[in-house]
Amino acid sequence: MVNIILFGPPGSGKGTQSANLINKFGLIHLSTGDLLRSEIEAKTPLGLEAKKVMDQGILVPDEVVIGMISSKLDANPEARGFIFDGFPRTTAQAEALDKLLALKKTSISVVLALEVPEHELISRLLGRGATSGRPDDANEDVIRARIVEYHNKTAPVADHYAKYGKFKKIKGEGSVEEIFERLSKEIDSLVEEKV
């Protein structure tokens, strides 16, 4: 099983590249935002608990998110692997995810971090904001704050996986195809190791 965490600041192309990688490698996309929404819609016990917390404006506790991830893993026993998107965001979440995966007799194979210069991210997001109608992509100050928050929160997670030799920086500039090729090369080497 190949399990990948795809990292990157807002505007780095994570969504686009996740979709491409899922198609090429037959991985399952594991987005914590999507999981929360589907658990809430299905009115599962975890979903009801998450909704209660979210309705109060509080972040959903890690245990609830880990529980949802565990359910998703159990529901897909034949999966070739997963792409984790939006999780883990803290070292505590990374440690909890590592423990869960160890219980399932698997682990994170690699963390791929898309590296894009700040001026490029701002340009991409302002471009997206002009067409998407997303207010958080239309204001340069808000964009800069999101980029700073990303670096502050995810740097410790990067350090956590770097300790195990599982953290790789990928140049996130160039065409969608060029970036996809760089990511694919990293994953191809992992798939070959597993065979």
Image (cartoon, helix red, strand yellow):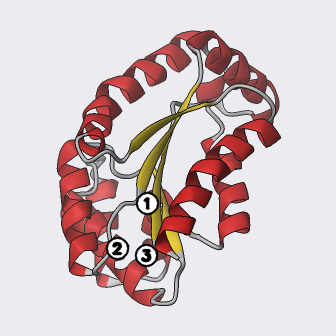
* Dot in front, 2 or 3: 2
CA separation in Å, label 2 and label 3: 8 Å
The residue carrying pointer 3 sits among few (fewer than 14), some (14 to 19) or many (20 or more) residues within 10 Å by Cα, namely: some
Amino acid type, label 2:
Met
Picture residue at 42% right of the left edge, 52% below the top = 110
Secondary element at tag 2: helix
Disc 3 residue type (three-letter):
Glu
Residue 91 drawn at (x, y percent): 21, 44
Whether residues under marks 2 and 3 lie with C-beta atoms below 8 angstroms apart, the answer is yes
Residue 151: image x %, image y %? Answer: 38, 24
Which is nearer the N-term, disc 2 or disc 3? 3
In the rendered image, which residue does mark 1 sit on? 32
Q: Position of residue 33 (x, y in %)?
A: 47, 57
First in sequence: mark 1 vs mark 2? 1
Decide which of 192, 15 is in the foreground and name it.
192
Using the image, tell me which numbered label, if any, was put on residue 39.
3
Residue behind mark 2: 68
Label 1: how many Cα within 10 Å (few below 14, some 14–19, many 20+): some
